[in-house]
Amino acid sequence: NGTVYVGATNTTLYAYDAAGQTNCGGIPKTCAPLWTAPTGGTFISSSPAVAGGLVYQGASDGNVYAFDAAGSTNCSGTPKVCSPLWTAPTGGAIYGSPGIAYGHLFIGSSDNKFYAFDALGDTNCSGVPKVCSPLWTATTGGAVESSPAIANGLVFVGSDDHDLDAFDAAGYLGCSGSPLVCTPIWHATTPNSVISSPAISRGHVYVESEGGSLYTYALGG
């Protein structure tokens, strides 16, 4: 919707006019942000994700932050600063980017877990300011620095334990207990850590292992 979002190592999320017009001037042209939003921790390495009028950012403090993408709700001041609509804690720093699908936000953490949250911040969310707990979680054998990819009702993510895991995105198959915990529908082991993000095309999922090789699997395992 005409806005570009980027997180910075100063733990702040920035929103700029993608056309380079509003808050921009000079020769060469330089732009000031439309709005900014502080997060916690000491750095941001995750790229933001945008869906349904919200922008989501993971941070090194282990939290996922959801902001109004238009910079209206929970935003004020000149220059404009926004506070989150909701936050969701994980148990470790977040390096990968959120994935949004089926009304869920999927994110991995360095606490060796993978999380699914309600993307709108309704289910399992409460308080002022609003804090959300997971719809389901999954334990991996290593830190999750990979960003997830989603297709055919499955969410795929790599981890430092050398595995590519495929989970039921809805949190039904392979999932049980309260709080809900999920195990992979299938997984594939590579020789080294899977830090890069899977890519999906034509019924296959592609992922690179740290050793420098690319692997491809059928979506169904």
Image: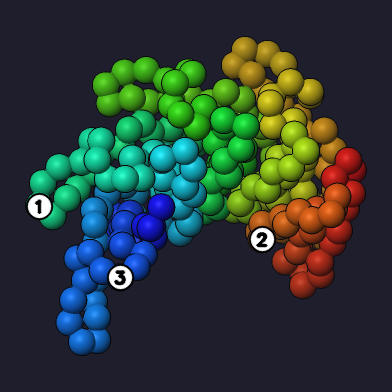
Residue at horizontal 37 percent and vertical 26 percent from the top: 131
Q: Which mark is residue 20?
A: 3
Q: In the rendered image, is residue 60 in sight?
A: no
Residue 83 shown left or right of residue 43 in the figure: left
Residue 114: percent from the left, percent from the top? 62, 37
Q: Which residue type carries mark 3? A: Gly
Q: Mark 1 touching mark 3, by CB under 8 A? A: no
Disc 3 and disc 2: Cα gap in Å? Answer: 31 Å
Q: Residues within 10 Å of mark 1 (few under 14, many from 20)?
A: few
> Quadrant of the rendered structure where residue 14 is?
bottom left
Instruction: Name the residue located 13 percent from the left edge and 55 percent from the top edge.
Output: 79
Instruction: Say left or right for 172 vs 79.
Output: right
Mark 1 vs 2: CB contact within 8 A: no
Identify the image quadrant of the C terminus: top right
Apparent side of residue 202 relative to residue 171 in the rendered image (left or right): right
- Of 152 and 37, nearer the camera is 152
Q: Is residue 51 above or below residue 12?
A: above
**Pair 1/3: label in front:** 3
Residue position marked by numbered label 2 in the rendering? 196
Instruction: State the SS at label 2.
Output: loop
Element marked by disc 1: loop
